[in-house]
Amino acid sequence: MTIDGDEPPPVRRLTVLHDPACPLCRSLTTWLRGQRQLVPLEFVAAASPEARALFPGLDHDASLGEITVVGDTGEVWRGHHAFVACLWALADHRSLAQRLSTPAGLPLARAAAFTAAKLRAVTKPSAGSCPTGECTVPG
């Protein structure tokens, strides 16, 4: 509830800002697109002209460094909170998102987001090293 007693508007759509040059980001985006969504997810390249036009007040440089999700109601989530927001939008993972959003679950969500960020840093191809766009994350 808000201070004036009105309920906040429900989130009806989430925009996931992702780095299409990052193999880990592409894998996550592909996985999210393949899931049954309770709340529709839209995907926009981070710091792109489209992202800048949609969200002029957003720190777009920061969105290149970590997953960023923007709700149609104006909320912005980054890092582990953004990861939990994505899970919350999915039919088969909402209960997991609810567990991860608790004080006991947030450290696990934070660890998962930190691990993903570290993987992203070591797997992101350098300019020109992935000309076909079919780079893979080392196994």
Image: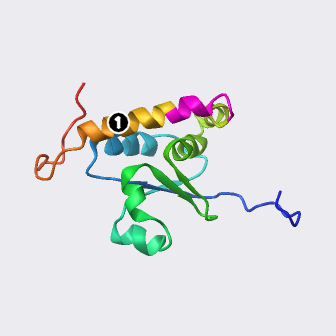
* Residue at x 73% of width, y 62% of height: 9
* Residue at x 64% of width, y 64% of height: 73
Look at the image and say whether residue 107 sits in the magenta stretch. Answer: yes
Q: Which residue is mark 1?
A: 118
Q: Position of residue 112 (x, y in %)?
A: 47, 32
Look at the image and say whether residue 109 sits in the magenta stretch. Answer: yes
Quarter-of-image position of residue 11? bottom right
Q: 43 and 66: which one is in front?
A: 66
Q: 24 and 42: which one is in front?
A: 24
- On screen, residue 7 above or below 84: below
Q: What's the amino acid at mark 1? A: Lys
* Residue at x 59% of width, y 63% of height: 72
- On screen, residue 133 above or below 31: below
Q: 91 and 127: which one is in front?
A: 127
Specify the color scheme. rainbow
First to last magenta residue range: 102-110
Quarter-of-image position of residue 87? top right
* Residue at x 49% of width, y 40% of height: 35
- On screen, residue 96 above or below 23: above
Q: Position of residue 54 (x, y in %)?
A: 47, 71
Query: Which residue is farthest right?
Result: 5
Q: Which image quarter holds the N terminus? A: bottom right
* Residue 44 in view in this figure: no
* Count of marks placed on residues: 1
Horizontal side of residue 126 vs 49, given as left or right: left
Q: Position of residue 126 (x, y in %)?
A: 16, 48
Circle 1: element type: helix
